[in-house]
Image: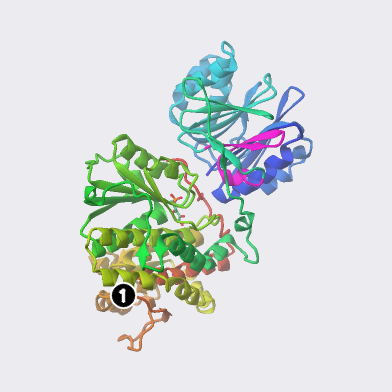
Amino acid sequence: MCGIIGISSNKPVSASIISSLKKLEYRGYDSAGIATLFEGEIKEVKSEGRVNTLEQNFDLKNLKGNIGIGHVRWATHGIPNSVNAHPHSSHNVSVVHNGIIENSTILKKYLTTKGHIFKSQTDTEVIVHLITENLKSNELEEAIKKTLKQLHGSFALGIVFKDIPDLIVGARRGSPLAVGYGPSENYLGSDSYALKSMTNKITYLDDGEFCIIKKDQVLFFNEDGKKINKKILELSSDESSYDKGDFKHFMAKEIEEQPTTVKTGIKEYVDKTNSDINIYNFPWNINEINSITLIGCGTAYHSCLMAKYWFEELTQLDISIDIASEFRYRKNRFKKDTLYIFVSQSGETADTYAALDLCNKNNMKTCAVVNIIESSIARDANFVLPIHCGPEIGVASTKAFLGQILILYILALKLASLRNEINQKIYKEKIKDLQKLPNLIEKSLLIDNDIQAISSTFNEAKGSMFLGRGLSYPIALEGALKLKELSYVHAEGYPAGEMKHGPLALIEDGMPVVVLAPRDSYYKKTISNMQEVIARGAKVLLITNKSKDEIVSENIWETIEVENINDDLLPFLLTIPLQKLAYYSALKKGYDIDKPRNLAKSVTVE
Ligand code: F6R
Protein backbone atom coordinates (compact mmCIF):
# COMPACT_ATOMS: atom_id res chain seq x y z
CA MET A 1 0.00 0.00 0.00
CA CYS A 2 0.97 3.63 -0.23
CA GLY A 3 3.61 5.01 2.11
CA ILE A 4 4.48 8.53 3.23
CA ILE A 5 7.69 10.22 4.37
CA GLY A 6 8.23 13.84 5.30
CA ILE A 7 11.34 15.53 6.71
CA SER A 8 11.83 19.05 8.01
CA SER A 9 15.53 19.62 8.72
CA ASN A 10 18.41 22.07 8.86
CA LYS A 11 20.16 20.18 6.02
CA PRO A 12 19.18 18.80 2.58
CA VAL A 13 16.58 16.04 2.84
CA SER A 14 16.22 14.31 -0.53
CA ALA A 15 18.75 11.50 0.17
CA SER A 16 17.13 10.69 3.54
CA ILE A 17 13.66 10.69 1.96
CA ILE A 18 14.83 8.25 -0.72
CA SER A 19 16.38 5.89 1.82
CA SER A 20 13.21 6.02 3.95
CA LEU A 21 11.10 5.30 0.87
CA LYS A 22 13.20 2.18 0.37
CA LYS A 23 12.16 1.08 3.85
CA LEU A 24 8.54 1.44 2.73
CA GLU A 25 9.02 -0.75 -0.34
CA TYR A 26 7.86 -3.81 1.59
CA ARG A 27 4.34 -2.40 1.62
CA GLY A 28 3.95 -3.02 -2.13
CA TYR A 29 3.66 -0.12 -4.62
CA ASP A 30 3.86 0.74 -8.28
CA SER A 31 5.27 4.30 -8.50
CA ALA A 32 7.23 6.70 -6.34
CA GLY A 33 7.92 10.40 -6.00
CA ILE A 34 9.43 13.17 -3.94
CA ALA A 35 8.95 16.94 -3.65
CA THR A 36 11.19 19.45 -1.87
CA LEU A 37 11.01 23.14 -1.23
CA PHE A 38 14.01 25.25 -2.22
CA GLU A 39 14.29 29.01 -2.58
CA GLY A 40 10.53 29.50 -2.68
CA GLU A 41 9.87 26.79 -5.29
CA ILE A 42 8.32 23.32 -4.95
CA LYS A 43 10.18 20.81 -7.16
CA GLU A 44 8.79 17.32 -7.84
CA VAL A 45 10.48 14.21 -9.22
CA LYS A 46 8.25 11.18 -9.89
CA SER A 47 8.47 7.91 -11.73
CA GLU A 48 6.58 4.72 -12.45
CA GLY A 49 8.06 1.57 -10.89
CA ARG A 50 10.51 1.16 -8.03
CA VAL A 51 12.36 3.71 -5.90
CA ASN A 52 15.55 2.60 -7.73
CA THR A 53 14.09 4.00 -10.95
CA LEU A 54 13.31 7.26 -9.18
CA GLU A 55 16.86 7.34 -7.87
CA GLN A 56 18.22 7.13 -11.41
CA ASN A 57 16.19 10.16 -12.48
CA PHE A 58 18.64 12.89 -13.39
CA ASP A 59 16.50 15.61 -11.74
CA LEU A 60 16.79 13.94 -8.37
CA LYS A 61 20.49 14.84 -8.15
CA ASN A 62 19.57 18.52 -8.39
CA LEU A 63 16.77 18.33 -5.85
CA LYS A 64 17.83 20.66 -3.08
CA GLY A 65 15.92 21.80 -0.01
CA ASN A 66 15.70 21.20 3.72
CA ILE A 67 12.01 20.33 3.65
CA GLY A 68 10.42 17.59 1.60
CA ILE A 69 7.84 14.84 1.24
CA GLY A 70 8.08 11.45 -0.47
CA HIS A 71 5.62 8.73 -1.40
CA VAL A 72 5.30 5.21 -2.72
CA ARG A 73 1.93 4.73 -4.45
CA TRP A 74 -0.26 1.66 -4.80
CA ALA A 75 -2.73 2.65 -7.49
CA THR A 76 -6.39 3.10 -6.58
CA HIS A 77 -7.66 6.02 -8.76
CA GLY A 78 -5.80 6.07 -12.08
CA ILE A 79 -3.19 3.77 -13.60
CA PRO A 80 0.33 3.54 -12.17
CA ASN A 81 2.38 6.11 -14.11
CA SER A 82 4.52 9.12 -13.32
CA VAL A 83 1.64 11.60 -13.73
CA ASN A 84 -0.53 9.80 -11.19
CA ALA A 85 2.41 9.23 -8.82
CA HIS A 86 2.53 11.44 -5.72
CA PRO A 87 3.33 14.16 -4.69
CA HIS A 88 0.67 16.19 -6.48
CA SER A 89 1.20 19.92 -6.55
CA SER A 90 -0.54 23.19 -7.39
CA HIS A 91 1.43 26.42 -7.78
CA ASN A 92 1.83 26.63 -4.00
CA VAL A 93 0.86 23.34 -2.30
CA SER A 94 2.24 19.80 -2.63
CA VAL A 95 0.55 16.73 -1.14
CA VAL A 96 1.26 13.03 -0.54
CA HIS A 97 -1.75 10.91 0.39
CA ASN A 98 -2.56 7.40 1.55
CA GLY A 99 -6.21 6.36 1.45
CA ILE A 100 -9.23 7.12 -0.72
CA ILE A 101 -11.24 10.34 -1.03
CA GLU A 102 -14.80 9.18 -1.59
CA ASN A 103 -16.27 12.55 -2.63
CA SER A 104 -13.45 13.43 -5.04
CA THR A 105 -15.76 13.65 -8.08
CA ILE A 106 -18.02 16.24 -6.44
CA LEU A 107 -15.04 18.20 -5.10
CA LYS A 108 -13.36 18.16 -8.50
CA LYS A 109 -16.46 19.66 -10.14
CA TYR A 110 -16.59 22.40 -7.51
CA LEU A 111 -12.87 23.18 -7.85
CA THR A 112 -13.04 23.20 -11.66
CA THR A 113 -15.70 25.93 -11.46
CA LYS A 114 -13.22 27.90 -9.33
CA GLY A 115 -10.64 27.67 -12.13
CA HIS A 116 -8.45 24.84 -10.83
CA ILE A 117 -6.85 22.66 -13.51
CA PHE A 118 -6.26 18.95 -12.88
CA LYS A 119 -3.37 17.02 -14.36
CA SER A 120 -3.85 13.48 -13.04
CA GLN A 121 -6.60 10.87 -12.69
CA THR A 122 -6.15 10.68 -8.93
CA ASP A 123 -8.48 11.53 -6.07
CA THR A 124 -5.47 13.05 -4.27
CA GLU A 125 -5.23 16.02 -6.58
CA VAL A 126 -8.53 17.39 -5.24
CA ILE A 127 -6.88 17.70 -1.81
CA VAL A 128 -4.11 19.84 -3.31
CA HIS A 129 -6.55 22.23 -4.97
CA LEU A 130 -8.94 22.28 -2.02
CA ILE A 131 -6.14 23.41 0.31
CA THR A 132 -4.97 25.93 -2.30
CA GLU A 133 -8.53 27.28 -2.51
CA ASN A 134 -9.02 27.40 1.26
CA LEU A 135 -5.69 29.16 1.78
CA LYS A 136 -6.99 32.10 -0.29
CA SER A 137 -9.19 33.26 2.58
CA ASN A 138 -7.85 31.45 5.66
CA GLU A 139 -4.72 31.20 7.76
CA LEU A 140 -2.92 27.84 7.63
CA GLU A 141 -4.58 26.05 10.57
CA GLU A 142 -8.05 27.26 9.61
CA ALA A 143 -7.49 26.21 5.96
CA ILE A 144 -6.35 22.72 7.02
CA LYS A 145 -9.26 22.29 9.45
CA LYS A 146 -11.73 23.38 6.77
CA THR A 147 -10.18 21.11 4.11
CA LEU A 148 -10.24 18.04 6.35
CA LYS A 149 -13.92 18.64 7.12
CA GLN A 150 -14.71 18.78 3.37
CA LEU A 151 -13.00 15.43 2.66
CA HIS A 152 -14.99 12.18 2.91
CA GLY A 153 -13.14 8.88 3.09
CA SER A 154 -9.82 7.89 4.57
CA PHE A 155 -6.47 9.59 4.49
CA ALA A 156 -3.03 10.13 5.86
CA LEU A 157 -1.55 13.31 4.42
CA GLY A 158 1.80 15.05 4.19
CA ILE A 159 1.63 18.62 2.86
CA VAL A 160 4.25 21.30 2.07
CA PHE A 161 3.61 24.92 1.11
CA LYS A 162 5.54 27.26 -1.15
CA ASP A 163 4.64 30.38 0.86
CA ILE A 164 5.03 28.84 4.34
CA PRO A 165 8.50 27.42 3.79
CA ASP A 166 9.49 26.05 7.18
CA LEU A 167 6.89 23.38 7.88
CA ILE A 168 5.09 20.17 6.87
CA VAL A 169 1.48 19.47 7.80
CA GLY A 170 0.43 15.89 8.59
CA ALA A 171 -3.19 14.75 9.00
CA ARG A 172 -4.87 11.45 9.71
CA ARG A 173 -8.31 9.93 9.29
CA GLY A 174 -8.48 6.16 8.90
CA SER A 175 -4.91 5.68 7.61
CA PRO A 176 -2.01 5.46 10.06
CA LEU A 177 0.48 8.31 10.44
CA ALA A 178 3.34 8.89 12.87
CA VAL A 179 5.64 11.76 13.78
CA GLY A 180 9.31 11.12 14.61
CA TYR A 181 11.72 13.32 16.51
CA GLY A 182 15.41 13.76 15.60
CA PRO A 183 18.26 16.14 16.39
CA SER A 184 17.54 19.42 14.53
CA GLU A 185 14.98 17.66 12.36
CA ASN A 186 11.56 16.06 12.67
CA TYR A 187 9.77 13.52 10.53
CA LEU A 188 6.42 12.30 9.27
CA GLY A 189 5.91 8.67 8.29
CA SER A 190 3.08 6.30 7.49
CA ASP A 191 4.59 3.72 9.83
CA SER A 192 7.26 3.54 12.48
CA TYR A 193 9.34 1.15 10.37
CA ALA A 194 10.07 3.88 7.81
CA LEU A 195 11.16 6.22 10.59
CA LYS A 196 13.14 3.70 12.60
CA SER A 197 16.42 4.29 10.76
CA MET A 198 16.21 7.97 11.76
CA THR A 199 14.66 7.89 15.24
CA ASN A 200 13.12 5.66 17.88
CA LYS A 201 11.00 8.50 19.33
CA ILE A 202 7.54 8.41 17.83
CA THR A 203 4.08 9.91 18.32
CA TYR A 204 1.08 8.38 16.54
CA LEU A 205 -1.65 10.67 15.33
CA ASP A 206 -5.19 9.56 16.16
CA ASP A 207 -8.11 9.82 13.76
CA GLY A 208 -9.17 13.40 13.09
CA GLU A 209 -5.90 14.94 14.30
CA PHE A 210 -3.39 17.00 12.35
CA CYS A 211 0.09 18.29 13.11
CA ILE A 212 2.58 20.95 12.07
CA ILE A 213 6.16 19.74 11.82
CA LYS A 214 9.09 22.18 11.85
CA LYS A 215 12.75 21.18 12.19
CA ASP A 216 12.74 22.11 15.90
CA GLN A 217 9.08 21.88 16.92
CA VAL A 218 5.99 19.70 16.46
CA LEU A 219 2.46 20.94 17.23
CA PHE A 220 -0.62 18.70 17.39
CA PHE A 221 -4.27 19.69 16.86
CA ASN A 222 -7.59 17.89 17.28
CA GLU A 223 -10.26 17.97 14.56
CA ASP A 224 -11.63 21.27 15.94
CA GLY A 225 -8.21 22.82 15.47
CA LYS A 226 -7.50 22.99 19.23
CA LYS A 227 -3.87 22.44 20.24
CA ILE A 228 -3.35 19.14 22.10
CA ASN A 229 -0.44 17.39 23.82
CA LYS A 230 0.54 13.89 22.78
CA LYS A 231 2.78 11.23 24.27
CA ILE A 232 6.17 10.37 22.79
CA LEU A 233 6.80 6.59 22.63
CA GLU A 234 10.24 5.01 22.57
CA LEU A 235 10.46 2.13 20.12
CA SER A 236 12.82 -0.77 20.44
CA SER A 237 15.43 -0.50 17.69
CA ASP A 238 16.25 -4.00 16.49
CA GLU A 239 17.59 -3.13 13.04
CA SER A 240 18.87 -6.68 12.47
CA SER A 241 15.30 -7.92 12.06
CA TYR A 242 15.04 -5.70 9.00
CA ASP A 243 17.99 -7.35 7.30
CA LYS A 244 17.83 -10.41 5.01
CA GLY A 245 21.18 -11.64 6.30
CA ASP A 246 22.37 -14.58 4.18
CA PHE A 247 18.90 -15.30 2.81
CA LYS A 248 17.90 -14.51 -0.75
CA HIS A 249 14.51 -13.22 0.33
CA PHE A 250 12.81 -12.01 3.50
CA MET A 251 10.21 -14.73 2.98
CA ALA A 252 12.88 -17.45 3.11
CA LYS A 253 14.30 -15.90 6.28
CA GLU A 254 10.87 -15.57 7.86
CA ILE A 255 9.98 -19.21 7.12
CA GLU A 256 13.19 -20.32 8.82
CA GLU A 257 12.53 -18.02 11.79
CA GLN A 258 9.36 -19.90 12.72
CA PRO A 259 10.91 -22.08 15.44
CA THR A 260 11.96 -18.81 17.12
CA THR A 261 8.51 -17.28 16.62
CA VAL A 262 6.93 -20.21 18.42
CA LYS A 263 9.64 -20.31 21.09
CA THR A 264 9.12 -16.60 21.83
CA GLY A 265 5.34 -16.99 21.96
CA ILE A 266 5.70 -19.89 24.39
CA LYS A 267 8.16 -17.90 26.53
CA GLU A 268 5.69 -15.01 26.71
CA TYR A 269 2.62 -17.00 27.61
CA VAL A 270 3.61 -20.34 29.08
CA ASP A 271 4.64 -20.96 32.68
CA LYS A 272 6.85 -24.00 32.12
CA THR A 273 7.39 -24.72 35.81
CA ASN A 274 3.71 -25.10 36.59
CA SER A 275 2.60 -26.16 33.10
CA ASP A 276 0.16 -23.31 33.02
CA ILE A 277 -0.68 -20.39 30.74
CA ASN A 278 -0.30 -16.78 31.84
CA ILE A 279 -2.54 -14.22 30.28
CA TYR A 280 -2.01 -11.17 32.44
CA ASN A 281 -4.58 -8.43 32.97
CA PHE A 282 -7.39 -10.18 31.06
CA PRO A 283 -9.95 -7.43 31.65
CA TRP A 284 -13.17 -9.46 31.89
CA ASN A 285 -14.65 -11.96 34.25
CA ILE A 286 -14.62 -15.29 32.45
CA ASN A 287 -18.33 -15.83 33.23
CA GLU A 288 -19.20 -12.73 31.23
CA ILE A 289 -18.13 -14.45 27.99
CA ASN A 290 -20.32 -17.10 26.33
CA SER A 291 -19.30 -16.67 22.74
CA ILE A 292 -16.38 -15.50 20.64
CA THR A 293 -16.33 -13.91 17.20
CA LEU A 294 -12.98 -13.90 15.42
CA ILE A 295 -12.39 -11.42 12.60
CA GLY A 296 -9.55 -10.93 10.11
CA CYS A 297 -8.58 -10.77 6.43
CA GLY A 298 -6.58 -13.14 4.19
CA THR A 299 -4.12 -15.23 6.13
CA ALA A 300 -5.33 -13.69 9.40
CA TYR A 301 -8.82 -14.94 8.53
CA HIS A 302 -7.38 -18.44 8.06
CA SER A 303 -5.99 -18.11 11.60
CA CYS A 304 -9.51 -17.29 12.78
CA LEU A 305 -10.85 -20.42 11.05
CA MET A 306 -8.09 -22.52 12.62
CA ALA A 307 -8.99 -21.10 16.04
CA LYS A 308 -12.66 -21.99 15.54
CA TYR A 309 -11.75 -25.69 15.38
CA TRP A 310 -9.58 -25.48 18.51
CA PHE A 311 -12.05 -23.43 20.54
CA GLU A 312 -14.89 -25.77 19.64
CA GLU A 313 -12.80 -28.79 20.52
CA LEU A 314 -11.52 -27.46 23.83
CA THR A 315 -14.38 -25.28 25.13
CA GLN A 316 -18.18 -25.06 25.10
CA LEU A 317 -18.08 -21.47 23.81
CA ASP A 318 -20.09 -20.54 20.71
CA ILE A 319 -17.60 -19.57 18.03
CA SER A 320 -18.19 -17.50 14.90
CA ILE A 321 -15.66 -16.22 12.42
CA ASP A 322 -15.91 -13.46 9.89
CA ILE A 323 -14.02 -11.76 7.10
CA ALA A 324 -13.59 -8.16 8.22
CA SER A 325 -14.79 -6.58 4.95
CA GLU A 326 -18.07 -8.53 5.31
CA PHE A 327 -18.49 -8.05 9.05
CA ARG A 328 -18.18 -4.28 8.91
CA TYR A 329 -21.19 -3.84 6.60
CA ARG A 330 -23.48 -6.62 7.85
CA LYS A 331 -26.35 -6.06 10.24
CA ASN A 332 -24.64 -7.69 13.19
CA ARG A 333 -26.42 -8.62 16.38
CA PHE A 334 -23.99 -7.27 18.94
CA LYS A 335 -24.10 -9.25 22.15
CA LYS A 336 -22.69 -8.21 25.52
CA ASP A 337 -21.51 -11.75 26.32
CA THR A 338 -19.44 -12.03 23.11
CA LEU A 339 -15.71 -11.44 22.96
CA TYR A 340 -14.67 -9.99 19.58
CA ILE A 341 -11.13 -10.99 18.61
CA PHE A 342 -9.37 -9.11 15.79
CA VAL A 343 -6.45 -10.92 14.19
CA SER A 344 -3.92 -8.90 12.19
CA GLN A 345 -0.19 -9.00 11.61
CA SER A 346 0.14 -5.30 10.75
CA GLY A 347 -2.62 -4.05 13.03
CA GLU A 348 -3.41 -1.51 10.31
CA THR A 349 -5.64 -3.45 7.88
CA ALA A 350 -8.41 -0.97 7.06
CA ASP A 351 -11.29 -3.48 7.06
CA THR A 352 -10.17 -5.15 10.29
CA TYR A 353 -9.73 -1.77 11.95
CA ALA A 354 -13.21 -0.66 10.77
CA ALA A 355 -14.71 -3.87 12.22
CA LEU A 356 -12.96 -3.19 15.54
CA ASP A 357 -14.12 0.41 15.51
CA LEU A 358 -17.70 -0.75 14.94
CA CYS A 359 -17.49 -3.11 17.92
CA ASN A 360 -15.93 -0.41 20.11
CA LYS A 361 -18.70 2.02 19.14
CA ASN A 362 -21.22 -0.64 20.22
CA ASN A 363 -19.38 -1.04 23.55
CA MET A 364 -18.39 -4.62 22.86
CA LYS A 365 -15.49 -6.49 24.47
CA THR A 366 -12.61 -6.27 21.98
CA CYS A 367 -9.30 -8.11 21.91
CA ALA A 368 -6.49 -7.80 19.32
CA VAL A 369 -4.10 -10.56 18.31
CA VAL A 370 -1.46 -8.49 16.51
CA ASN A 371 2.21 -8.38 15.68
CA ILE A 372 2.79 -4.62 15.61
CA ILE A 373 1.97 -3.46 19.09
CA GLU A 374 2.16 0.22 18.20
CA SER A 375 -0.52 -0.28 15.51
CA SER A 376 -4.00 1.26 15.38
CA ILE A 377 -5.74 -2.06 16.08
CA ALA A 378 -3.51 -2.74 19.09
CA ARG A 379 -4.05 0.75 20.44
CA ASP A 380 -7.81 0.74 20.08
CA ALA A 381 -8.71 -2.78 21.27
CA ASN A 382 -9.65 -3.21 24.94
CA PHE A 383 -7.05 -5.93 25.32
CA VAL A 384 -4.02 -6.99 23.26
CA LEU A 385 -2.34 -10.36 22.83
CA PRO A 386 0.89 -9.65 20.90
CA ILE A 387 2.33 -12.45 18.78
CA HIS A 388 5.93 -11.23 19.19
CA CYS A 389 7.25 -12.54 15.87
CA GLY A 390 9.34 -9.48 14.98
CA PRO A 391 8.99 -7.53 11.74
CA GLU A 392 7.51 -9.53 8.88
CA ILE A 393 8.74 -7.89 5.69
CA GLY A 394 7.81 -10.42 2.96
CA VAL A 395 4.35 -9.52 1.69
CA ALA A 396 3.19 -13.13 2.01
CA SER A 397 2.56 -13.85 5.65
CA THR A 398 4.43 -16.86 7.05
CA LYS A 399 5.79 -16.51 10.57
CA ALA A 400 2.94 -14.19 11.55
CA PHE A 401 0.48 -16.97 10.64
CA LEU A 402 2.19 -19.44 12.98
CA GLY A 403 2.45 -16.68 15.60
CA GLN A 404 -1.27 -15.96 15.34
CA ILE A 405 -2.41 -19.57 15.52
CA LEU A 406 -0.06 -20.20 18.45
CA ILE A 407 -1.57 -17.37 20.51
CA LEU A 408 -5.11 -18.40 19.58
CA TYR A 409 -4.42 -22.00 20.60
CA ILE A 410 -2.92 -20.80 23.88
CA LEU A 411 -6.01 -18.63 24.49
CA ALA A 412 -8.34 -21.53 23.71
CA LEU A 413 -6.49 -23.75 26.18
CA LYS A 414 -6.52 -21.09 28.89
CA LEU A 415 -10.23 -20.35 28.50
CA ALA A 416 -11.00 -24.08 28.55
CA SER A 417 -9.08 -24.34 31.82
CA LEU A 418 -10.68 -21.26 33.40
CA ARG A 419 -14.13 -22.51 32.41
CA ASN A 420 -13.35 -25.97 33.80
CA GLU A 421 -13.99 -27.51 30.42
CA ILE A 422 -10.72 -29.38 30.18
CA ASN A 423 -9.36 -32.00 32.51
CA GLN A 424 -6.32 -30.48 34.29
CA LYS A 425 -4.11 -33.48 33.49
CA ILE A 426 -4.89 -33.14 29.78
CA TYR A 427 -4.42 -29.36 30.00
CA LYS A 428 -0.93 -29.77 31.43
CA GLU A 429 -0.03 -32.47 28.90
CA LYS A 430 -1.08 -30.18 26.06
CA ILE A 431 1.09 -27.39 27.49
CA LYS A 432 4.04 -29.79 27.66
CA ASP A 433 3.43 -30.79 24.04
CA LEU A 434 3.42 -27.15 23.02
CA GLN A 435 6.99 -26.86 24.21
CA LYS A 436 8.07 -29.59 21.78
CA LEU A 437 6.84 -27.55 18.82
CA PRO A 438 9.90 -25.32 18.09
CA ASN A 439 12.15 -28.36 17.75
CA LEU A 440 9.67 -30.23 15.56
CA ILE A 441 9.15 -27.18 13.33
CA GLU A 442 12.91 -27.01 12.93
CA LYS A 443 12.96 -30.63 11.73
CA SER A 444 9.99 -30.04 9.42
CA LEU A 445 11.93 -27.23 7.75
CA LEU A 446 14.49 -29.68 6.34
CA ILE A 447 12.57 -30.53 3.20
CA ASP A 448 13.97 -28.08 0.67
CA ASN A 449 15.28 -30.66 -1.81
CA ASP A 450 12.02 -32.60 -1.98
CA ILE A 451 9.88 -29.49 -2.32
CA GLN A 452 12.07 -27.88 -4.96
CA ALA A 453 11.61 -30.84 -7.27
CA ILE A 454 7.85 -30.97 -6.68
CA SER A 455 7.25 -27.25 -7.21
CA SER A 456 7.80 -27.36 -11.01
CA THR A 457 4.68 -29.49 -11.49
CA PHE A 458 2.57 -26.82 -9.77
CA ASN A 459 4.05 -24.10 -12.00
CA GLU A 460 3.39 -26.01 -15.20
CA ALA A 461 -0.24 -26.92 -14.39
CA LYS A 462 -3.30 -24.85 -15.30
CA GLY A 463 -4.32 -24.92 -11.67
CA SER A 464 -4.11 -26.94 -8.47
CA MET A 465 -6.21 -27.86 -5.44
CA PHE A 466 -5.40 -28.06 -1.75
CA LEU A 467 -7.64 -30.38 0.27
CA GLY A 468 -8.02 -31.00 3.97
CA ARG A 469 -10.63 -31.82 6.60
CA GLY A 470 -11.04 -30.61 10.17
CA LEU A 471 -7.92 -28.91 11.49
CA SER A 472 -6.24 -29.38 8.10
CA TYR A 473 -8.91 -27.44 6.20
CA PRO A 474 -7.70 -23.94 7.24
CA ILE A 475 -4.17 -25.04 6.37
CA ALA A 476 -5.34 -26.14 2.90
CA LEU A 477 -6.83 -22.65 2.38
CA GLU A 478 -3.61 -21.03 3.57
CA GLY A 479 -1.46 -23.25 1.29
CA ALA A 480 -3.57 -22.33 -1.76
CA LEU A 481 -3.42 -18.62 -0.88
CA LYS A 482 0.38 -18.74 -0.58
CA LEU A 483 0.76 -20.45 -3.96
CA LYS A 484 -1.56 -18.11 -5.84
CA GLU A 485 -0.16 -14.90 -4.36
CA LEU A 486 3.48 -15.82 -5.01
CA SER A 487 3.37 -17.90 -8.21
CA TYR A 488 0.35 -16.32 -9.87
CA VAL A 489 -1.10 -19.77 -10.65
CA HIS A 490 -4.66 -20.66 -9.85
CA ALA A 491 -4.89 -22.65 -6.62
CA GLU A 492 -8.04 -23.52 -4.72
CA GLY A 493 -8.33 -24.61 -1.10
CA TYR A 494 -11.30 -26.89 -0.34
CA PRO A 495 -12.69 -29.07 2.43
CA ALA A 496 -11.90 -32.52 1.03
CA GLY A 497 -15.44 -33.74 1.73
CA GLU A 498 -16.92 -31.03 -0.50
CA MET A 499 -15.18 -32.16 -3.69
CA LYS A 500 -18.03 -34.29 -4.95
CA HIS A 501 -20.43 -31.35 -4.59
CA GLY A 502 -18.89 -29.56 -7.56
CA PRO A 503 -15.12 -29.06 -7.66
CA LEU A 504 -14.45 -32.69 -8.64
CA ALA A 505 -15.43 -31.55 -12.15
CA LEU A 506 -12.16 -29.58 -12.27
CA ILE A 507 -9.96 -32.64 -11.80
CA GLU A 508 -8.30 -33.80 -14.98
CA ASP A 509 -5.33 -35.90 -15.94
CA GLY A 510 -2.13 -34.65 -14.32
CA MET A 511 -3.69 -31.90 -12.20
CA PRO A 512 -1.61 -31.43 -9.03
CA VAL A 513 -3.65 -31.82 -5.84
CA VAL A 514 -2.22 -31.40 -2.34
CA VAL A 515 -3.99 -33.62 0.17
CA LEU A 516 -3.40 -32.85 3.84
CA ALA A 517 -4.16 -36.09 5.65
CA PRO A 518 -2.48 -36.28 9.04
CA ARG A 519 -3.33 -39.40 11.02
CA ASP A 520 -6.00 -37.69 13.11
CA SER A 521 -9.68 -38.54 13.47
CA TYR A 522 -10.36 -37.39 9.88
CA TYR A 523 -7.60 -39.51 8.34
CA LYS A 524 -9.68 -42.31 6.83
CA LYS A 525 -12.26 -39.91 5.41
CA THR A 526 -9.59 -37.74 3.81
CA ILE A 527 -7.84 -40.76 2.32
CA SER A 528 -11.14 -41.78 0.70
CA ASN A 529 -11.47 -38.28 -0.76
CA MET A 530 -7.90 -38.58 -1.99
CA GLN A 531 -8.76 -41.85 -3.80
CA GLU A 532 -11.61 -40.07 -5.55
CA VAL A 533 -9.31 -37.43 -7.03
CA ILE A 534 -6.61 -39.99 -7.91
CA ALA A 535 -9.25 -42.03 -9.75
CA ARG A 536 -9.94 -38.97 -11.91
CA GLY A 537 -6.31 -38.45 -12.87
CA ALA A 538 -5.02 -36.08 -10.13
CA LYS A 539 -1.31 -36.07 -9.30
CA VAL A 540 -1.52 -36.19 -5.52
CA LEU A 541 1.05 -34.71 -3.18
CA LEU A 542 0.10 -36.26 0.15
CA ILE A 543 1.24 -34.44 3.27
CA THR A 544 0.85 -36.48 6.43
CA ASN A 545 2.72 -37.22 9.64
CA LYS A 546 5.21 -40.03 10.15
CA SER A 547 3.82 -43.45 11.03
CA LYS A 548 4.78 -47.10 10.99
CA ASP A 549 1.49 -47.87 9.26
CA GLU A 550 1.55 -47.96 5.50
CA ILE A 551 -0.74 -45.59 3.66
CA VAL A 552 -3.39 -47.74 2.05
CA SER A 553 -3.29 -46.23 -1.38
CA GLU A 554 -1.44 -46.73 -4.59
CA ASN A 555 -0.79 -44.13 -7.22
CA ILE A 556 0.15 -41.33 -4.86
CA TRP A 557 2.52 -39.10 -6.82
CA GLU A 558 4.61 -37.77 -3.91
CA THR A 559 4.45 -37.98 -0.11
CA ILE A 560 5.90 -35.64 2.48
CA GLU A 561 5.87 -36.76 6.10
CA VAL A 562 6.08 -34.22 8.92
CA GLU A 563 7.03 -35.01 12.51
CA ASN A 564 4.62 -36.39 15.10
CA ILE A 565 2.90 -34.47 17.86
CA ASN A 566 -0.61 -34.44 19.34
CA ASP A 567 -3.36 -33.85 16.76
CA ASP A 568 -4.09 -30.27 17.93
CA LEU A 569 -0.60 -29.17 16.98
CA LEU A 570 -0.18 -30.93 13.63
CA PRO A 571 -1.42 -27.84 11.70
CA PHE A 572 1.79 -26.03 12.69
CA LEU A 573 3.89 -28.73 11.03
CA LEU A 574 1.64 -29.18 7.98
CA THR A 575 1.97 -25.47 7.18
CA ILE A 576 5.73 -25.61 6.57
CA PRO A 577 5.80 -27.68 3.33
CA LEU A 578 3.06 -25.49 1.86
CA GLN A 579 4.99 -22.28 2.56
CA LYS A 580 8.08 -23.81 0.95
CA LEU A 581 6.09 -25.09 -2.02
CA ALA A 582 4.89 -21.54 -2.75
CA TYR A 583 8.35 -20.09 -2.18
CA TYR A 584 10.15 -22.47 -4.54
CA SER A 585 7.44 -22.22 -7.23
CA ALA A 586 7.88 -18.44 -7.30
CA LEU A 587 11.67 -18.74 -7.13
CA LYS A 588 11.70 -21.01 -10.20
CA LYS A 589 9.57 -18.52 -12.07
CA GLY A 590 11.87 -15.68 -11.11
CA TYR A 591 9.07 -13.67 -9.54
CA ASP A 592 9.48 -10.92 -6.99
CA ILE A 593 8.91 -13.12 -3.95
CA ASP A 594 8.93 -10.45 -1.26
CA LYS A 595 6.76 -8.08 -3.26
CA PRO A 596 4.28 -10.05 -5.40
CA ARG A 597 2.50 -8.08 -8.10
CA ASN A 598 -0.60 -6.07 -7.16
CA LEU A 599 -0.25 -6.87 -3.46
CA ALA A 600 0.71 -4.83 -0.42
CA LYS A 601 1.94 -5.78 3.01
CA SER A 602 -0.34 -3.50 4.91
CA VAL A 603 -3.75 -3.01 3.31
CA THR A 604 -4.68 0.41 4.60
CA VAL A 605 -7.47 1.07 2.08
CA GLU A 606 -10.79 -0.73 1.80
C1 F6R B 1 -1.31 -13.28 2.68
C2 F6R B 1 -1.33 -12.07 3.48
C3 F6R B 1 -2.60 -11.30 3.57
C4 F6R B 1 -2.76 -10.72 4.98
C5 F6R B 1 -4.01 -9.82 5.04
C6 F6R B 1 -4.25 -9.28 6.44
O1 F6R B 1 -0.06 -13.88 2.69
O2 F6R B 1 -0.33 -11.68 4.03
O3 F6R B 1 -3.69 -12.08 3.22
O4 F6R B 1 -2.87 -11.77 5.89
O5 F6R B 1 -3.84 -8.75 4.15
O6 F6R B 1 -3.17 -8.52 6.88
P1 F6R B 1 -2.96 -8.24 8.42
O7 F6R B 1 -2.66 -9.54 9.08
O8 F6R B 1 -1.81 -7.29 8.47
O9 F6R B 1 -4.25 -7.64 8.92
Colour basis = rainbow
Q: Spot the residue most to the top.
A: 137
| 292 displayed left or right of 459 | left
| Quadrant the C terminus occupies | top left
The residue indicated by pointer 1 is 533
Q: Position of residue 173 (x, y in %)?
A: 47, 32
Closer to the camera in the image, 215 or 275: 275
Q: Position of residue 377 (x, y in %)?
A: 42, 43
Q: Check disc 1 and report its element: helix, strand or loop.
A: helix
Q: Residue at x 36, y 69 (%)?
A: 431
Q: Is residue 50 visible?
A: no
Q: Position of residue 219 (x, y in %)?
A: 59, 26
Q: Position of residue 562 (x, y in %)?
A: 42, 78
Q: Spot the residue most to the front.
A: 273
| 135 displayed left or right of 280 | right
- Mark 1 within 8 Å of ligand 1, using the beta carbon: no
Mark 1 nearby-residue class (10 Å; few <14, some 14–19, many ≥20): many
Stretch of the chain drawn in magenta: 177-197
- Identify which amino acid the numbered label 1 is placed on: Val
Residue 183 is covered by the magenta coloring:
yes
State the image quarter where residue 83 is shown: top right
